[in-house]
Amino acid sequence: MSDFETYDCDNCDGEFAAHPSARAAETSYCSPRCESVGTGLV
Ligand SMILES: [Zn+2]
């Protein structure tokens, strides 16, 4: 059973699958690297 949904990364526009309850689904970044870049931490 798969509850994963597809999201578009806010940084690289890449699609990624994440569970709706996962942190990635909230932040909309496909990876910690994209999150860092997208949030201006790098
Ligand atoms: Zn990304």
Image (spheres, rainbow, N blue to C red):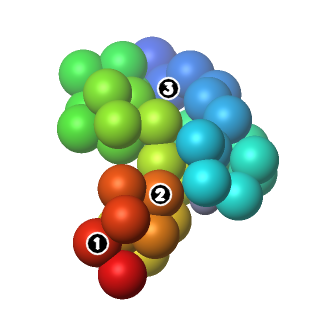
Residue 9 percent across, percent down from the top left: 61, 44
Give left or right: position of 32 versus 22. right
Question: Quarter of the picture for ligand 1?
Answer: bottom right
Q: Secondary structure at mark 2?
A: helix
The Cα–Cα distance between marks 3 and 1, rounded to whole angstroms, is: 28 Å
Say which amino acid is labelled 3.
Phe
Asked whether 41 or 29 is in front, the reply is 41
The residue lying at 36 percent from left, 81 percent from top is 42
Q: Determine whether label 2 and label 1 are within 8 Å by CB.
A: no
Q: Which residue is mark 3?
A: 4
Vertical placement of 32 versus 35: above or below? below
User: Which residue reaches farthest bottom?
Assistant: 42
Q: Which residue is mark 1?
A: 41
Tell me which amino acid carries mark 1: Leu
Foreground mark, 3 or 2, reads 2
Marker disc for residue 38: 2
Crowd band around label 2 with a 10 angstrom C-alpha radius: few (<14), some (14–19), many (20+)? some
Q: Residue placed farthest to the front in the image?
A: 40
Position of residue 14 in the picture relative to residue 39 (left or right)? right
Category of crowding for the residue at label 1, using alpha-carbon neighbours closer than 10 angstroms: few (below 14), some (14–19), many (at least 20): few
Image quadrant assignment for residue 12:
bottom right
Residue 28, position in %: x, y? 47, 36
In the image, residue 40 sits, relative to residue 11, either above or below, namely: below
Work out whether residue 27 can be spotted. yes
The three-letter code of the residue at mark 2 reads Gly
Is the CB of the residue bearing disc 2 within 8 angstroms of ligand 1?
Answer: yes
